[in-house]
Image (tube, rainbow, N blue to C red):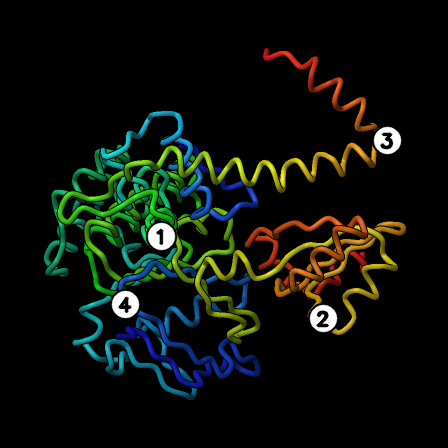
């Protein structure tokens, strides 16, 4: 997880997204320990209340859960939950911004289609 | 429980009100930032909290008690500022020994650790130290005494950027291990915003705002695009600052637009950005005339 003070995204959102990314990348595993509020707070020199807020966002959405006395854990099925959520955002917001920008620049749908089909992973 | 309760606090110096009807309640066990320009009244407020000066009128209670000349309260707080009390020629190690005697909750082991970490020569006399080293000694005393109310007035003066970062980390870690109320004054909000849970904005001796750091970060937004469009769009809205260039403008407004309005802005090619807390602080306290006059 990397946090940026330069970013316009609030820190607690960055924390939630950072943990999510670490879950998708396999740095944090399902049914295993996640980072604690104080770990995050010390690591990035941020107020513990801010760290708690980021974690609670994920508890609320069911991605993390608290085991009494053992701390935060990654829920079973968390990877799928996060991927589904990000897929939804990609299909609605990302694609729509992308299409609007293409339209502004006068790139036609046919052209886009060709570029997507010819796109090779680098 | 609120640790500091100030009611219509006023401090008059000749014909200037350094504090002007200042009322505030400050909660327990949080790190709170007191932010204002030079001369805004930060130090006057903190000195009143610490019992160093007496208000002209109004009331201040610390731990539900009056603070001025009250040892019960004074023994539960520490006030660290730049004009240090040790300028009398004591050696650093003597200052540390005195702190050990004076503060019941003094953590000598931690103090030794910090002295080593900062590579301070404890045989040197305080007044012979460089400005940065003096600040380091002040910080050690301020942190290691672990007072329930810790007041740090511009604690990083004279420290380089790397050292300031170090200090913030030490302060935060110690706060986690030993929760207490810490008030830090600064005009460098961008450096300390991550540490803070609440922020108090002071200007001309008056309370401008007291809110959570999170609400402050979300307080405003920046709209940029066509001037004519933005002029009519922002009519009747709370505009904090305007910056124009030819026929495009940047409007800083209060962040309370409806979804419908945001869609409308996007459809009219207006870009929407968030405003950094430091920028918002400057906009709120500079009244937006800075560039036009010069």
Residue B86 image position (x, y, % from top left): 27, 55
User: Residue B141: where, in percent of width, then height?
Assistant: 24, 52
Q: CA distance from mark 2 to mark 3?
A: 35 Å
- Taking the image as shown, residue B283 lies to the left or right of residue B16, namely right
Mark 1: secondary structure? helix
Number of the front mark, 2 or 1: 1
* Mark number displayed over residue B237: 2
**Badges 2 and 1: C-beta atoms under 8 Å apart?**
no
| Residue, disc 3 | A106
The residue pinned by badge 4 equals B28
Question: Is B24 positioned to the left or the right of B231 in the image?
Answer: left
Pointer 3 chain: A
Q: Chain of mark 2?
A: B
The image shows residue B159 at horizontal and vertical percentages of 42, 42
Is residue B157 visible in the rendered image? The answer is: no
Task: Give the Cα distance between marks 3 and 4.
Answer: 58 Å
Q: Is residue B80 visible?
A: yes
Q: Quadrant of residue B25?
A: bottom left
Residue in the image at 51% along x and 70% along y: B209
CA distance separating discs 2 and 4: 36 Å
CA gap between label 1 and label 3 equals 43 Å
For the residues carrying marks 2 and 4, which lies nearer the camera in this image? 2
* Mark 2: secondary structure: loop
Q: Quadrant of residue B73?
A: bottom left
Q: Residue A60 bears which disc, if any?
A: 1
Asked if labels 1 and 3 share a chain, the reply is yes
Of the 4 image quadrants, the one containing the N terminus of chain B is bottom left
Using the image, name the chain to which the residue with label 1 belongs: A
């Amino acid at each position: 997880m990397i946090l940026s003070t330069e970013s316009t995204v609030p820190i607690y959102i960055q924390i939630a997204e950072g943990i999510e990314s670490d879950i998708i990348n396999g740095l944090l595993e399902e049914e295993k320990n996640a980072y604690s509020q104080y770990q995050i707070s010390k690591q990035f020199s941020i107020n513990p209340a801010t760290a708690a807020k980021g974690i609670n966002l994920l508890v609320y959405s069911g991605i993390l859960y608290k085991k009494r006395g053992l701390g935060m854990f990654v829920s079973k099925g968390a990877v799928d939950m996060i991927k589904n959520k990000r897929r939804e955002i990609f299909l609605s917001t990302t694609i729509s911004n992308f299409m609007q920008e293409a339209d502004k620049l006068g790139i036609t749908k046919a052209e886009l289609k060709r570029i997507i089909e010819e796109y090779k992973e680098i | 429980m609120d640790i500091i309760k100030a009611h219509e606090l006023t401090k008059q110096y000749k014909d200037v009100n350094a504090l002007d009807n200042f009322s505030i309640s400050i909660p327990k066990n949080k790190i709170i930032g007191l932010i204002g320009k030079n001369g805004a009244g930060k130090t006057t407020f903190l000195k009143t909290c610490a019992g160093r000066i007496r208000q002209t009128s109004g009331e201040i209670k610390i731990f539900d008690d009056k603070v001025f000349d009250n040892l019960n309260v004074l023994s539960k707080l520490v006030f660290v500022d730049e004009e240090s009390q040790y300028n009398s020629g004591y050696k650093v190690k003597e200052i540390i020994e005195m702190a050990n005697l004076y503060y019941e909750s003094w953590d000598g082991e931690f103090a030794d650790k910090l002295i080593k970490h900062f590579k301070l020569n404890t045989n040197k006399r305080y007044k012979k130290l460089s400005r940065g080293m003096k600040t380091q000694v002040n910080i050690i005393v301020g942190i290691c005494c672990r007072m329930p109310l810790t007041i740090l007035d511009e604690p990083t003066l004279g420290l380089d950027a790397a050292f300031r970062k170090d200090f913030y980390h030490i302060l935060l870690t110690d706060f986690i291990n030993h929760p207490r109320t810490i008030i830090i004054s600064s005009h460098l909000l961008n450096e300390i915003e991550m540490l803070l849970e609440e922020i108090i904005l002071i200007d001309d001796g008056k309370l401008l705002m007291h809110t959570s750091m999170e609400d402050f970060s979300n307080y405003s937004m920046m709209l940029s695009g066509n001037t004519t469009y933005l002029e009519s769009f922002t009519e009747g809205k709370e505009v904090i600052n305007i910056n124009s260039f030819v026929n495009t403008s940047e409007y800083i407004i209060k962040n309370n637009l409806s979804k419908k309005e945001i869609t409308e802005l996007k459809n009219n090619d207006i870009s929407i950005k968030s405003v950094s807390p430091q920028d918002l602080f400057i906009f709120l306290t500079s009244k937006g005339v800075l560039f036009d006059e010069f």
